[in-house]
Image (cartoon, rainbow, N blue to C red):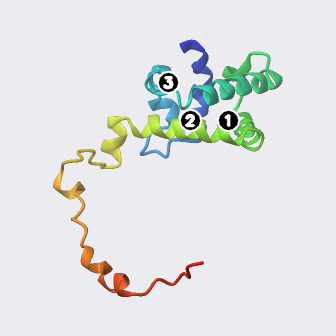
Amino acid sequence: MNLDTYGILTAFYGVLIPSNGTMPSGSEIIAESDLHQLLEMTHKYAKSIENVCEFISKESVSLSKEGASNITDQNRVAILRSMESTMPSDFDMFLEATYLLYYSKPIIHQLIKWNTDEDAGKNQLKPFDSSILDNISKREPFWRKI
């Protein structure tokens, strides 16, 4: 699939992640090139995204001669619901990729006040205290050997 094919998904990002006034919608944040870049980094989503694009294209044409660019959000919701019920694995991968692309944007990190610095003190876990397992380790096994 070429880069232009992914453009069909743009309006659907906004249905999956609508704007709430404070946060931008998925359509405002996710560019076609973002998906293309994700698919270059990993092939995990490739087949599912291809299937999703094909499904949306066929369903959109059945609703409007102009295709996906000329349907309403209600139609998009109906297409997504149909996709979820008929091809749940591909839908899940599309949804996962959409959220991954959305929440990978620095502007979203700022808006949700997400500190992505893994080395920051507040992002460090306390060392595990193995003494909390002392009582459990003293117990006899509760299973029987056969």
Q: Which residue is mark 3?
A: 39
Where residue 50 appears, as percent x and y from the top left, is: 64, 24
Secondary structure under tag 1 reads helix
Q: Quadrant of the C terminus?
A: bottom right
Where residue 91 appears, as percent x and y from the top left, is: 65, 38
Secondary structure under tag 2 reads helix
Residue that appears at 62% across and 26% down: 47
Query: Relative to residue 119, is residue 31 depicted above or below?
Result: above
- Look at the numbered discs 3 and 1 and tell me whether their residues touch, using CB distance below 8 Å: no
Residue that appears at 49% across and 46% down: 20
Quarter residue 41 falls in: top left
Closest to the camera, between mark 3 and mark 1, is: 3
Q: Amino acid at mark 3?
A: Leu
Q: Which mark is residue 73?
A: 1
Instruction: Judge from the rendering whether residue 125 lies leftward or rightward of residue 12; answer left or right.
Output: left
- Look at the numbered discs 1 and 2 and tell me whether their residues touch, using CB distance below 8 Å: yes
Question: Observer-nearest residue: 10 or 48?
Answer: 48
Quarter residue 138 falls in: bottom left
Quarter residue 10 falls in: top right
Query: Counting residues from the N terminus, which is met first, the one under dot 2 or under dot 3?
Result: 2
Which residue is farthest left? 121
Label 1 crowd bin: few (<14), some (14–19), many (20+), radius 10 Å = few
Instruction: Judge from the rendering whether residue 136 lies leftward or rightward of residue 143; answer left or right.
Output: left
Q: Which residue is mark 2?
A: 14
The alpha-carbon separation of the residues under discs 1 and 2 comes to 9 Å
